[in-house]
Amino acid sequence: MFGWLKRGSAGAGHPLVRQDDPGTFRVRVRTRGHGEVVEFRFTKAAHIGADDGGGYLFRKPVISPQHFDRGEFVVRFDSRYRVTGTEAEGVDFIPVAEWED
């Protein structure tokens, strides 16, 4: 009962992607050039698109604010919006366990 109130039920458990609520996700990446940390918040409704394989994905180019380091990352989801994988070029994901809130 009240399963819809559980925080992060769909994406829970993935070490690199944090689910803030049922429709919102966050990741933090560190640029390889200068080590700048950049955070991204994205939603099912506005940012995540359909993938050819029947799931969903979020692809984001990264340009760091101070040094303009460039990179790109992808977060892949299954049909129930559970994170199935991550990929990155020019940046490294920061594990959620290492975030300082």
Image (cartoon, rainbow, N blue to C red):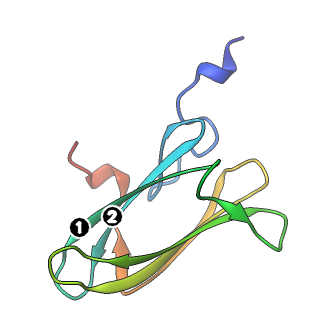
Mark sitting on residue 93: none
**What is the residue that sits farthest to the top in this orientation?**
1
Decide if residue 39 is on the left or right side of residue 59: left
Residue 30, position in %: x, y? 27, 73
Decide if residue 12 is in sight here. Answer: no
27, above or below 18, in the image: below
Q: Residue at x 84, y 64 (%)?
A: 54
Q: Residue at x 68, y 20 (%)?
A: 3
Residue 48, position in %: x, y? 63, 59
**What is the residue that sits farthest to the front in this orientation?**
46
3, above or below 1, in the image: below
Instruction: Report the amino acid beneath label 2.
Output: Ile
Q: Residue at x 28, y 65 (%)?
A: 38
Q: Nearer the viewer, mark 2 or mark 1?
A: 1
Query: In what quadrant of the picture does the C terminus appear?
Result: top left
Query: In what quadrant of the picture does the N terminus appear?
Result: top right
Disc 2/disc 1 C-alpha distance (Å): 9 Å
Decide if residue 21 is on the left or right side of residue 54: left
Instruction: Report the amino acid beneath label 1.
Output: Val
Name the image quarter holding residue 92.
Answer: bottom left
- Identify the residue position indicated by label 2 in the image: 94
Residue 91, position in %: x, y? 35, 80
Query: Of 71 and 101, which appears nearest the observer?
Result: 71
Decide if residue 10 is in sight here. Answer: yes
Query: Of 42 and 36, which appears nearest the observer?
Result: 42
Residue 29, position in %: x, y? 33, 68
Mark sitting on residue 37: 1
Q: Earlier in the sequence, mark 2 or mark 1?
A: 1
5, above or below 13, in the image: above
**Cβ atoms under marks 2 and 1 closer than 8 Å:** yes
Within 10 Å of disc 2 (Cα), the crowding (few <14, some 14-19, many 20+) is some
Query: Of 15 and 29, which appears nearest the observer?
Result: 29
